[in-house]
Amino acid sequence: MCIFCDIIEGKVPSTKRYEDDKFIIIDDISHRAKKHYLIIPKAHYSTFAEQTEEQAIDLGLMLNRFSRFDKILGLEEGYRMMINQGENAGQSVEHVHVHILGGEKLPVAP
Ligand code: AMP
Ligand code: ZN
């Protein structure tokens, strides 16, 4: 369906940091900070408009659980969660995902 679906299905290689029945966490291939991860739901939906309430709950829980991963992922000093939606935000993969940026002091976001 898309590059992230191919990664989830193992058809495209990735550096997987975490996996459960609903999510994977991988390294972003062109990292924009010292540490740059992507939290990707296994369910394919391109925007929040397509997200079901159940998927919203799952994502909320995943973001909550992520707070316990900071030490293993080198994010003890903090990190930024970022989601691009649509053309104006520069969303390039139409499969909702959360960027996690950290590992260094980040520039102020626009
Ligand atoms: P966005 O622009 O918010 O849609 O983010 C898509 C992100 O996916 C970009 O930061 C890309 O670098 C990243 N990306 C694209 N293809 C791959 C891949 N095969 N493995 C890991 N990250 C990828
Ligand atoms: Zn997909």
Image: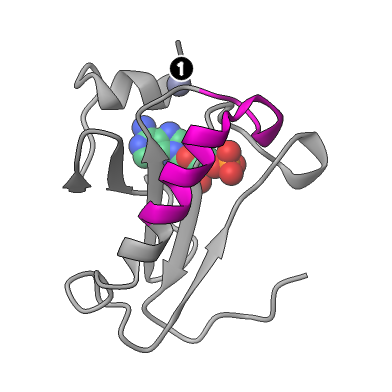
> In the image, is residue 34 above or below residue 10?
below
Where ligand 2 lies, by image quadrant? top left
Q: Quadrant of the N terminus?
A: top left
Q: Residue at x 39, y 40 (%)?
A: 40
Q: Residue at x 22, y 16 (%)?
A: 11
> In the image, is residue 66 above or below residue 17?
below
Q: Amino acid at mark 1?
A: Cys
> Does residue 62 appear left or right of residue 10 in this picture?
right
Give neighbour class at mark 1: few <14, some 14-19, many 20+ (Cα, 10 Å): few
Q: Nearer the viewer, residue 68 or 90?
A: 68
Label the magenta part by its dominant secondary structure. helix
The quarter of the displayed image where residue 106 is located: bottom right
Residue ID for mark 1: 2
Q: Quadrant of the C terminus?
A: bottom right
> Does residue 67 appear left or right of residue 80 in this picture?
left
Q: Nearer the viewer, residue 92 or 99?
A: 99
**Mark 1, secondary structure of its residue:** loop
Magenta span has 87? no
Give x and y (percent) for residue 21: 21, 33
Give x and y (percent) for residue 105: 49, 87
Farthest residue toward the right? 88
Give x and y (percent) for residue 42: 35, 29
Query: Which stretch did the figure color magenta?
Result: 45-62
Whether the residue carrying mark 1 lies under 8 Å from ligand 2 is answered with yes
Q: Residue at x 53, y 64 (%)?
A: 81
Figure coloring:
one colour
Q: Nearer the viewer, residue 47 or 60?
A: 60
Farthest residue toward the top? 1
Magenta span has 46? yes
